[in-house]
Amino acid sequence: MTCHSPIVVALTLAIAAGASSCISASDQSHMVVDPQQCDGPLGSPAQLQTPVGASEGPSIDAPAQCYESSSGMDRGAYIRIHGHGTRRLVMGSANRDRACVPPASASPDVCPEVLADAVGQMIFGMLQERGIQVNGIGAGVCAQREAMRSQDVNDWNFSVGIMNWKDADTAIAIVDEVLRNLGIGDSFGISVRGIDCNSVPL
């Protein structure tokens, strides 16, 4: 009998469901909206307490902040969290057939590629379980549209979106936990962002 950790089981279900990498306007319509979120996330970057470039615990880059877009969804900051394993995150469109889920305690050569959107769905769910308002999976804040033509998760600033700086440390810790448990060496991000107020009635 093969046993899987809760994270592996959750990831298996996410892949089987064909995880979506976007949040729809109808999903946003159910959000509790503060008009300030039209211009970006709530709170302040000063609320982030996770140290940049730490040798222990989550390893993150300094937040990259972008506020030039007219949409709150693209106004805020992207925080890159680095993995520590050998498995790669891959985009679904070109790799869905060969990407798989690593069984618990599998050697690094088993399932060397894992779908980024499936990992994102799992992180999304874990954040919601903690009562954190989540906003989107996929292309992150500061992603350049030209670069997004590639199938590289780093070019996409692939991330899960949150809407308040007060939740950033918890979100970073959850991403770090998932990357470590799955042995993923690529980075995954958190986008601290606002909302698209053209899609959400205020």
Image: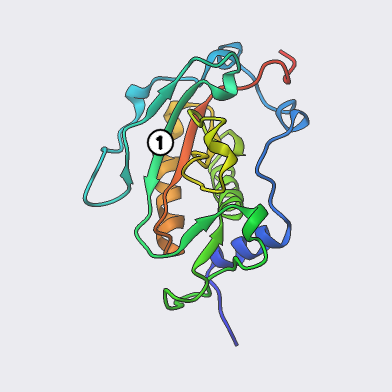
Label 1: state its secondary structure: strand
In the image, what residue occupies the spot 45% across and 33% down? Answer: 167
In the image, what residue occupies the spot 56% across and 38% down? Answer: 148
Total number of numbered discs in the rendering: 1
* Extreme residue in the right direction: 26
Using the image, determine if residue 194 lies above or below residue 101: above
Across and down, in percent, residue 130 comes to 53, 43
- Left/right of residue 199 with respect to residue 166 in the rendered view: right
Across and down, in percent, residue 135 comes to 60, 33
Using the image, determine if residue 5 lies above or below residue 159: below
Using the image, determine if residue 44 lies above or below residue 17: above
Viewer-proximal residue among 75 and 156: 156
Viewer-proximal residue among 128 and 59: 59
Using the image, determine if residue 33 lies above or below residue 161: above
Across and down, in percent, residue 145 comes to 57, 30
**Identity, as a three-letter code, of the amino acid under mark 1:** Ile
- Left/right of residue 127 with respect to residue 52 in the rendered view: right
How crowded pointer 1 is (Cα within 10 Å; few <14, some 14-19, many 20+) is rated as: many
Across and down, in percent, residue 153 comes to 51, 47
**Quarter of the image where the C terminus is located:** top right
In the image, what residue occupies the spot 41% across and 23% down? Answer: 65
The answer to which quarter of the image holds residue 168 is top left
Give the colour scheme of this rendering.
rainbow
**Quarter of the image where the N terminus is located:** bottom right
Residue identified by numbered label 1: 79
In the image, what residue occupies the spot 66% across and 23% down? Answer: 32
* Extreme residue in the bottom direction: 1
